[in-house]
Amino acid sequence: MSKPYNDYVEYLNKTICIPSVQYYQAIDMFAGCGGLSLGFESAGIKTIGYEMVGDCCDTYKKNLESECNQKVIDENTDFPYADIIIGGPPCQPFSRRGKQKGKNDARNGFPAFIEAVRRVRPKIWLCENVKGLPEQNAEYFQSVVKQFKELGYKVEYRIFQLVQYDVPQNRERLVIVGHQGWFDFPKPNDYKITAGEALGSMATEIPKNAAFLTPSMDEYIARYEAASKCKNPRDLHLDRPARTLTCRNLAGSTSDMHRIKLPDGRRRRITVREAARLQGFPDWFEFMGTEESQFTQIGNAVPPIFAYKLAKAVIHCLEGGHDGLQNVANN
């Protein structure tokens, strides 16, 4: 199947936008800057965000027509009723790059998420996390699934390669869904969006206040890639999807930094707007806080274009089938 659009950026900006009418309400726990909420709102689901980081709340409120409550979420947090609970419990406890404390990590958000589901009793819930959770923390993961099942939900999960869902990067994530009937996960594309399609002319331009790598940084990169036997330089290749965006490689160490090699041979770090494009954010979305904070928000976010596809599947489930979904779209 060929791409259903000619211009990825135009498609992104038109698809990810807030409609005037919304049919359901969702609570977004650990909302971050609102990537998951943005996708759900674009599909017609009003969200209420809960997030402890101030810059993230400011970004959420700047762009979404919803409230975002700044607070630390725990098992005692009160929530209003909602049809849906969504969220991304902090993934650091289960990430391969972290200390892997798992369930013993104070940042583990699953107990709070489970308790919220128990209290609110939504019609459906959905959460996103690192792909390694079911295997690397198998015992804990199965205990989480068991607790959700004891609340009366059917639990399904799948590991997604987001490059198959209009996200121009190689990013793998786990999605867990709890429902009381049936659920169809969104179908993958048989095409991929390249970094060049996502960035367009920005990739070869020199933006204002461009952050160029110094000769010593270039030398460090060369030594690092030689020592690690890197087959392909870790510069951004415009003819393929980007590497996974993370907080670390957006604003972190030189060796792993997302950077573009210009025709004149110089390298520059990608900009916040370029990072947002690669993470599936529309151009109208504005991030708040310092540049480092903005990069962190993007690296932690659920790509909105992927969240939009998940939201459509949630609506499909709530409406009981394709005909119901079509009725919602036509009202």
Image: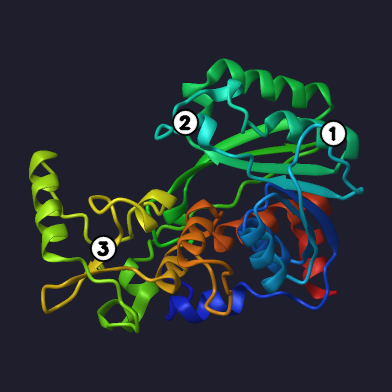
285 to the left or right of 171: right
Mark 2 vs mark 3: which is more N-terminal?
A: 2
Q: Nearer the viewer, mark 3 or mark 1?
A: 1
Q: What residue sits right under mark 2 in the picture?
A: 132
Which residue occupies 45% across, 70% down?
277
Query: The C terminus is located in which quarter?
Result: bottom right
Occupied quadrant, residue 39: bottom right
Which residue occupies 40% across, 62% down?
168
Which residue occupies 75% across, 22% down?
147
Q: Helix, strand or loop at disc 1?
A: loop
Q: What residue sits right under mark 1 in the picture?
A: 76
Q: Amino acid at mark 2?
A: Gly
**Separation of residues labelled 2 and 1 (CA atoms):** 28 Å
Q: Amino acid at mark 1?
A: Asn
Q: Which mark is residue 236?
A: 3
| Residue 153 seen anywhere in this rendered image of the structure | yes
Q: Where is residue 75 shown, x and y percent of the image? A: 80, 32
